Amino acid sequence: MRLTSQTVSNGVTERLFTHGGIPGALWTPADAHGPRPLVLLGHGGGQHKTAPGLLARAHRYVTRHGFAVTAIDAPGHGDRPKTAHDEQFTARLRQQMAAGEPVTALIAQDNARRATQAIPEWQATLDALQNVEDVGTAGPVGYWGVSLGSRIGMPFVAAEPRITAAVFGLVGCDTHTGDTLTDAAARLTVPVRFLLQWDDELVPREAGLALFDAIASPDKTLHANPGRHVDLPRAEMDSDERFLTHHLTGKPQSNPR
């Protein structure tokens, strides 16, 4: 792992790094020493490792709970070079959206391709982070990621025994990709929270419900809210935080007053 920059702000140390050519960010308490729980954040399509929503979530986990948090750029995103395939996908996506044509299958196919590349990248990043003194191997690991973050995260978590709980959502079963997400869901055993937008224009409701049904974990909950793909209520951030904190620390999932 090669450190490219380090800054401290509001009690949070942010370290930008590259590992195996993959750009990432690590956030820890400014006074951190010794191992601690680690939360992995998977960004959505078109975003990157330090997108505002991801950054806000990372700071909450660090300042409120003393966790370490990390995110990496997915293939073709952030500081990673874009391939000819990436450019073709973007052009076709814009064309179909402008024409009012459905884009669900196109996005699912593209995201499945990126997931195949990103899973070993996440595993290598986790290996490297656990050699960092203020992360270590002793603390439990959680995963949060929706949309593209779930396309990558579900097969990653299914294959990674170090992860103890996960939040997924804004994805569904899709026969256009060989239903790889259903296969991954059937191998999940950790506690899972699944987020679904009832009026999602990119993920048909039935596809999201079918994917939740396919999750094999005996400890799973479905959180459905009205609204489109990007309209996740802010309250879900609080709920996700309580869920992951409970499973990473053993503290009760107390509801806010």
Image (cartoon, rainbow, N blue to C red):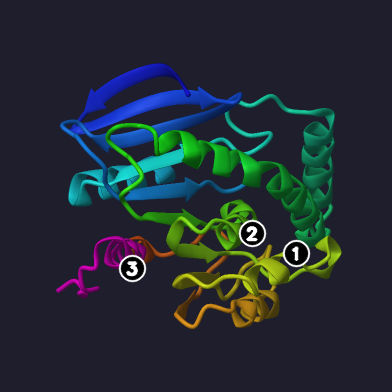
Dot 2 falls on a residue whose secondary structure is helix
| Quadrant into which the C terminus falls | bottom left
Residue type of the residue flagged with mark 1: Thr
Residue 81 appears at what percent x and percent y? 69, 24
* Residue corresponding to mark 2: 155
Q: Which of marks 1 and 3 is nearer the N terminus?
A: 1
The question of residue 101 being in magenta is answered with no
- Give the side of residue 95 with respect to residue 20, left or right: right
Q: Tell me which residue sits at (19%, 71%) in the image.
A: 256
Graded by Cα atoms within 10 Å as few (under 14), some (14 to 19) or many (20 or more), the crowding at tag 1 reads: some
Spatial CA span between label 2 and label 3: 20 Å
The dot on residue 180 is: 1
Amino acid type at circle 2 is Pro
Q: Are marks 1 and 3 in contact (CB under 8 Å)?
A: no
Q: Alpha-carbon neighbours of circle 2 within 10 Å: few (<14), some, or many (≥20)? A: many
Q: In this view, does 126 lie above or below 146?
A: above
Marks 2 and 3 in Cβ contact (< 8 Å): no
Where disc 3 sits, the SS reads helix
Q: What stretch is highlighted in magenta?
A: 238-257
Across and down, in percent, residue 72 comes to 52, 37
Residue 80 percent across, percent down from the top left: 63, 27
Residue receiving disc 3: 243
Amino acid under disc 3: Phe
The picture quadrant where one finds residue 228 is bottom right
